[in-house]
Image: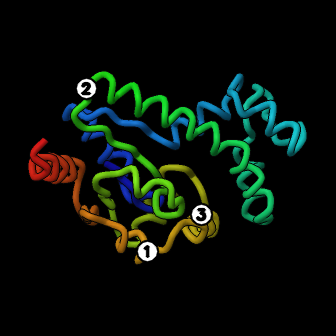
Amino acid sequence: MGVTGGIGSGKSTVAGFLGECGATVVDADALSRELTSPGGRAIPAIEAAFGREMIDTQGGLDRAAMRQLVFTDAGARLRLESLVHPLIWQEIDRRRDAARGAGVRLLVFDVPLLVEMPRWRPMLDTVLVVDCSPASQRSRVMARNGMDAAEVQRIMDAQAPRARRLACADHVMFNEGIGLAELRRQTEQFLGALRI
């Protein structure tokens, strides 16, 4: 199954709760960070394509510099994706095959760009969208990441619109005005309804 939602919606928290309940979770963002960290497999290609100025002092991707570039240059975003996404897909395929081989009953993919990447939907039995208001998204990300409202809004604008995410959902979990305990309870209830 896939779990998705806009930035700050709580999708990774829900995926984490599913993992605590016994699911095997593959986090697409974590794979991307692994590939672009110091020594990551994508670093040589990123440096060759974008120059040393996109590599931080530890030898990983300078995320702030790259974020600034891709939000001002759509071509840069496409170039970066063409370098990183094939590597992510290789790892996703490897982990999916390993989970199947191990007899995993519930494999959960935590994917921020599930809606934006058509390749995902055919490989998923069900899609859970974790949703909240845009105002909550902004305030959560500003508090969590120390970004200003304009920067958060640029990220939100680059993601699929909320209506499009909701249209692809088989299930929706509304994470608005509730605490972590209630979100966990709803996650456990959702898992029970799947009867896995």
3D distance between C-alphas at marks 3 and 1: 16 Å
Residue 26 image position (x, y, % from top left)? 41, 37
Label 1: which secondary element? helix
Farthest residue, direction bottom: 163
What amino acid type should be assigned to the residue bearing mark 2?
Gly
107, above or below 175, in the image: above
105, above or below 156, in the image: above
Mark in the foreground, 2 or 3: 2
Closer to the chain start, of discs 1 and 2, is 2
Residue 182 image position (x, y, % from top left)? 16, 53
**Residue at coordinates 75% horizontally, 40% vertically from top-left?**
62
Query: Crowding near pointer 1: few (<14 within 10 Å), some, many (20+)?
Result: few
- Camera-side residue of 150 and 171: 171
Question: Mark 1 = which residue?
Answer: 164
3D distance between C-alphas at marks 2 and 3: 37 Å
Question: Mark 2 = which residue?
Answer: 103
Label 2: which secondary element? loop
127, above or below 92, in the image: below
Residue 9 image position (x, y, % from top left)? 39, 59
Mark in the foreground, 3 or 1: 1
What amino acid type should be assigned to the residue bearing mark 1?
Arg
**Residue at coordinates 54% horizontally, 35% vertically from top-left?**
31
Q: Quadrant of the C terminus?
A: top left
3D distance between C-alphas at marks 1 and 2: 33 Å
Query: Crowding near pointer 3: few (<14 within 10 Å), some, many (20+)?
Result: some
144, above or below 38, in the image: below
Question: Mark 3 = which residue?
Answer: 155
**Residue at coordinates 25% horizontally, 40% vertically from top-left?**
18
